[in-house]
Image: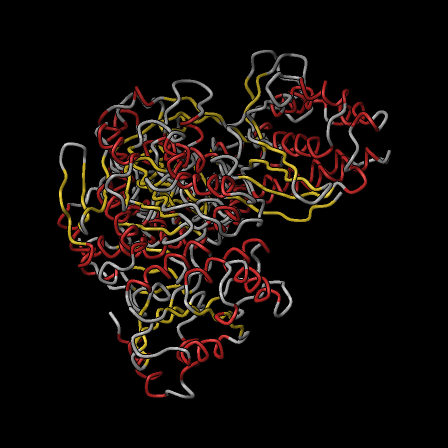
Amino acid sequence: MKITKQRYLRGANLYTTEPCLLATIDLEQLGQASSADVPGFGDALLALMPTLRKQERAGGRPGGFVERLAQGAHFADIVKHVTMELQHLVGHQVGFSHVGEVREQGNYNVVCAYISERTVSAALEMALELVLALAEGQAYDYDDKLAQLRRLAQRSAVGTSTGAVVGAARRRGIPAHRITEDANLFQLGWGSKQKRLQATMTGDTGHIAVGLASNKQLTKALLEEAGLPVPQGETVTNIEEAQRVARRLRGAVTIKPLDANQGKGVTTVCTSDEEIAAAFEHARQYSRHVIVERFLKGRDYRVLVTGGVVAAASCRRPPMVTGDGVGTIRELVEVENRNPARGDGHTNILTKIALDDHALAAARKHGFDFDSVPPAGVEVELRGNANLSTGGTAEDVTDVLPPATARICVRAAKTIGLDVAGIDIVCDDIALPLAEQGGGIIEVNAAPGIRMHQYPSRGTPRDAGDAIVEAMFGDGDGRIPLIAVTGTNGKTTTTRLIAHAAGLAGRHTGMTTTEGVYIDGELVEHGDCTGYHSARMVLSAQEVDFAVLETARGGILKRGLAFDRCDVSVVLNVTEDHLGMDGVDTLRDLARVKRVVADAASRAVVLNAEDALCMAMAGQLRGGVELLFFSLDAENPELLRHLEHGGRAVYLQDHMAILADGARHQALLDARRMPVTLNGHARYNIANALAAAAALTAAGFTPEQIAQGLASFVSDGRSNPLRSNIFDVNGVKVIVDFAHNGAAYAALADMARGMTTGKVIGVVSVPGDRRDEDLRQVGKVCASGFDDLVIYESENRGRTQGETARLLTSGARDADVDTGRLHCKLDVHRAIRFGLGMCKPGDVLVFGCGSSMSELIEAIRPEMPAVAERIASEITTAG
């Protein structure tokens, strides 16, 4: 067995709305076999992975997978189940999975939801290795491989505190995007509404404030200057200084590094010179400078301040065990560390208790070592500090915090300049005012851990993550308006029309198209930018407050959507194109891909009332989303029925674009006044304009704003390249268009016919990766639509030279036209020159499937250099 193809579908996709790994696997020798054909396979698998017994059979019964194994499970299905269970065993609770057969015999698509891309990929590889080894009767080092997978999952895991904030954001509907699996850095929200989060530090956390919080002496100086209670102390650099300072303070001291965190290097209750020396050496492991300060007697409390208010307060207790009169300290710790809530690092609710030198020193203060048996009920502390990161526990005390102490904590956070801060207080009883008991602030922490508040060992859990999100976003959801446009033809023009109107209305617009990514009209990335990464570029741009995303078939299939939902989806049409690729073999398959965009809409979906596959989507969308139709036919039955039921639509009647909501029909403007319609001849662009008007209406723009946008958008070689751009070549109208399927060529021929009483010449091609029958169909359509046809070759994409042109010509001959009208010139420049040679002034030449405006310019440059320069100048200065 082997993986032949693998993709990460990072957003909503054909299968689910969750991120998924899509892998095509070749079962090779196991392609025709099942588990029943391999004696002992099921028993061997369940012996290694007994938790598979709980997995359901497709359809739903718990334990059904075991039954299926005995009856004869397909090996692709087994790989899927094992991959999912391996993710569960490393702590990734994901639910969706799917198996589907693909065209190649013995090959199957295995789809598994994931939390971590690295982990799911490694889990799939392990599943393949495991299943193959058992099928061949070979041994497999399962325990070691699973341990490796766990370590990999741990390295990419999101910390508990970060996860609490991100989870709270998602519950509020705020989109959350992890920048990489190597860091706990998240983007919350989109565009101008976005915030950044790393651990519990936000993008509003100041660099100077973080630096101050990490320097305990500077923190103490600022707090003292502000009149806030802090213990006396000094910073030292050697043992002798530490001992002298301790003697001056006359009592027990606490010794800690100047700039460490998480309780590292802290020793409390030091009284003798020997204890001070040992504590100094311990602190020096974490910092060159060491603080010696008066030991404050009492309990250790942490108060979380977010956005100028106290969100939670906890009493932190050092890691400890309670004797039972039987077990040793070592044995008691082993039992406690088996608590499922404890783990390594910060990914669990609690951290495992370490039995190290510091734990031993703490135990000896109680008169014990690790092999001592404490009497029943005796508590033995195993650390000098109460940080959760060293194994401590916490009890919620938020409700007993006095208002005066809360104000002190808020002032401390503001004094240091932190929007999110953990204020560490030592006092006998947090319920009493600090001044009455000699308590004080011992630290102010940037990026405070919030596990203790979210999951206290005792007391009421506090949603500290939500408190942080509240401080960041208030009542907002961090989203900017987003319109997604899909369909077979017209996506780019419709996207540009919407973005142009939004820009005129004062919105800072980000746009993705097949030509590139644009921010406020400026090209920032060139190329076919209609997929996941380009959409992320727009949604990550901090200046963007309105997004319009052309969303193509390929991007959906390769990576899924870059957004969890959009405000408005537009589906323009579903016609034959790209069939036979990526498992999309029929028009219904293609419609399923386009429907992924429609399903993402939260506010409205715009559909073409004249397209049967678009209209089929109308009955499949979830409730609560408005449907708006557009149509070139004012008498379209679907349109009329929709309006009768109070729906909204935009349609064409007597050249006028009409916005209707059932009772009211309002004229927007004459379609002939829209430059993109070429005086009304380009009916496909009228349809695109109607769709754009419907989308803008759904997004809340006024009719006046919509009309202004449609009336001022010019579709020329600069503002909308390769989309029906018209140039004059010595009296011949040359139309340059990206057309590459039958529907687009038919629409172009119809438009060109309306622009002249002379001949219409077509210079056409299609990318070679289309099916043979699709190429023949395009040839037939073009032969029927144009008076003369010149066929050239664009991108062969795997076909031999001349094969694409041969298939186009074969289809053209099927149109039963005079073969004298058919010409083949493989080179694009020769084809353009040949086509122009057949034209007279007043004729129209359509140049389709162009990949660049330079193709026309370079084709005519040898014979018409002045015309070529003029066209090049028009492209540069247009708009």
Q: How far across and down, in percent of the image, does residue 350 sit?
A: 52, 28
Q: Residue at x 41, y 57 (%)?
A: 744
Q: Quadrant of the N terminus?
A: top right
Residue 135: image quadrant is top right
**Residue 222 visible at all:** no
Judge from the rendering whether residue 582 lies leftward or rightward of residue 646; answer left or right. right
Relative depth, front residue between 678 and 49: 678
**Residue 160 visible at all:** yes
Residue 684: image quadrant is bottom left
Judge from the rendering whether residue 582 lies leftward or rightward of residue 568; answer left or right. right
Q: Residue at x 81, y 26 (%)?
A: 44
Q: How far across and down, in percent of the image, does residue 667 sit?
A: 14, 46
Q: Does residue 5 sit above or below 874 in this rendering?
A: above
Q: How far across and down, in percent of the image, does residue 178 sit?
A: 45, 45
> How many numbered marks, from 0 up?
0
Q: How far across and down, in percent of the image, does residue 808 sit?
A: 55, 62
Relative depth, front residue between 634 and 162: 634
